[in-house]
Image (tube, rainbow, N blue to C red):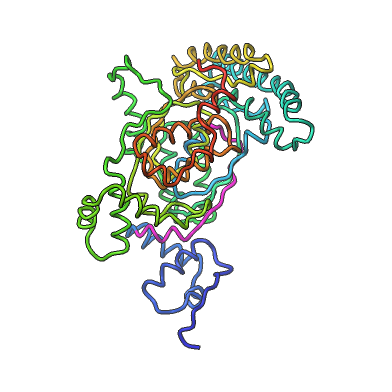
Amino acid sequence: MKNKRRIYSLENLTEEEVAVCFAKCSRTPDSFEVIAKELTEEKSSRFHEKWVVGYGHSSVAEHAVVRLAIENVSLLSVEWIQDNRLVSFTEKSSRYQIYDKEHYFVPTEIKKDKKMLKLYRQAVESLLDTYEAMIEPLTEFVSKREGEDLPVSKLRGMVMDQARFLLPAAMLTNLGMTANTRSWEYAISKWLSSGVDEVVEIAKEAKAKIKKICPTLVKYADKNEYLADIYNKSKNLVKGVSKEKVCNRPVRVVDWDRGAMDKVVATMLYGGGSGDYKQALSWVKKKDKKWKLAFLKKRLKERSEHDHLPREFESVFISFDVLSDQGAYYDFKRNRMMTQIRQDLTIENGYMVPKMIKDVGMERVYMEAIEKMEEIYRVIKKQYPKSAQYLVTKAHNRRYLLKMNLRELFYFVRLRARKAGNFAYRRMAMIMLEETKKKYPELMKLFFEEKELDSRKKIEKEYFWKFK
């Protein structure tokens, strides 16, 4: 039948051929099957050279997808790897796997300096010896407290949730990464511009592997001097900024939307109407708060616990200045749709000690391992500041900015504050929720119930012993 709807997959084509096939539909009435029959790898390569590379039609490259297995890269490098939005990742879990003492990264500049290499290994291996030594007493403690019926996987998760705070950023991990070649090209360019030797080497290897699959589409992914300048010279510019009155609160709201409720309601009306946005906003501002709340309650009435908030909630934002343990940030970095600006890893902001470590009588051993590492960190940092970051543990506190819209915040808190999650990031998510409620009290009551989540105080009392 003429004009019958057809939905089908394209088989036996390379990724570059698929991209060309889809791109050509904009200029020809032929079906994708007809277009595909005319394609060869050579023709596809010429097409991409002309249109994607030559004329900058980069969206064509989004149809070519490449998956890479990335093994034995440091936790520090993963922050650069995962700092890309339109990409999919799955990574080795520090919650359900025990990290091997032999598997950690040593920067090239440290390898070349025998004195520093010896100190570096002492710091890492002291942390890992303590990490391994804590596993048995923690396992016995949790088994006794929770009972024999506790599943093995849950037991291990509860134990490693405590022990993993001693893991330094040098630990090696594995991850799978899936992205289209437009995203790969940008990611590789960022990595090559990072100024971190390990990340630069990862970029070169990834580019070489992708070129075997898509010879043309990442060929010109190179170091970007503009990005390199942003990444590396900003550190020099900030030296004159005073640190006398640094705020040590875990979360501080630094910016938010003053007309939040009006904006959400106006955006909802705009989507269902035919006038302009300014007109809708002006009309909403004339309504009282009672009417606006009733309107929003009606719109959200049918939402189940599995539904996201309507997209209109993206019209309102909030920004946090956060100081948390690195373990919490390492999980938060995966929420990539928000804006994240992180500072370098450092020991300057102190570290945390989980309560369970004290309960099993190992708080002194834990703190001694960290403090030994800190002494070595200070020595190495004087000569090799970038390499010193590899010694910083997940227990150490780190500063970062998070900016997100309310729809993203809703998803973020529901994901990160749930009881099945790690206590460190649950605490931070709950503090962010508390601070958001202060700025948007009426809006937050519409979609968050107190009974759903443990309070920040309950989490701190149950899981935290000391913040140093």
Residue 25, image quadrant: bottom left
Q: In this view, does 428 lie above or below 15?
A: above
Q: Which residue is drawn at 44% across and 17% down?
A: 348
Q: Residue furthest bottom?
A: 1
Left or right, 48 with reference to 210: left
Q: What residue range appears in magenta?
A: 57-75
Residue 283, image quadrant: bottom left
Residue 268 at x, y percent in the picture: 33, 57
- Whether residue 26 appears in magenta in the rendering, the answer is no
Residue closest to the eye, 172 or 416: 416
Residue closest to the eye, 387 or 214: 387
Q: Residue at x 41, y 71 (%)?
A: 24
Residue 270 at x, y percent in the picture: 28, 59
Residue 1 at x, y percent in the picture: 50, 88
Residue closest to the eye, 451 or 437: 451
Left or right, 134 with reference to 149: left
Left or right, 184 with reference to 276: right
Q: Which residue is drawn at 40% across and 56% down?
A: 298
Residue 289 at x, y percent in the picture: 29, 47
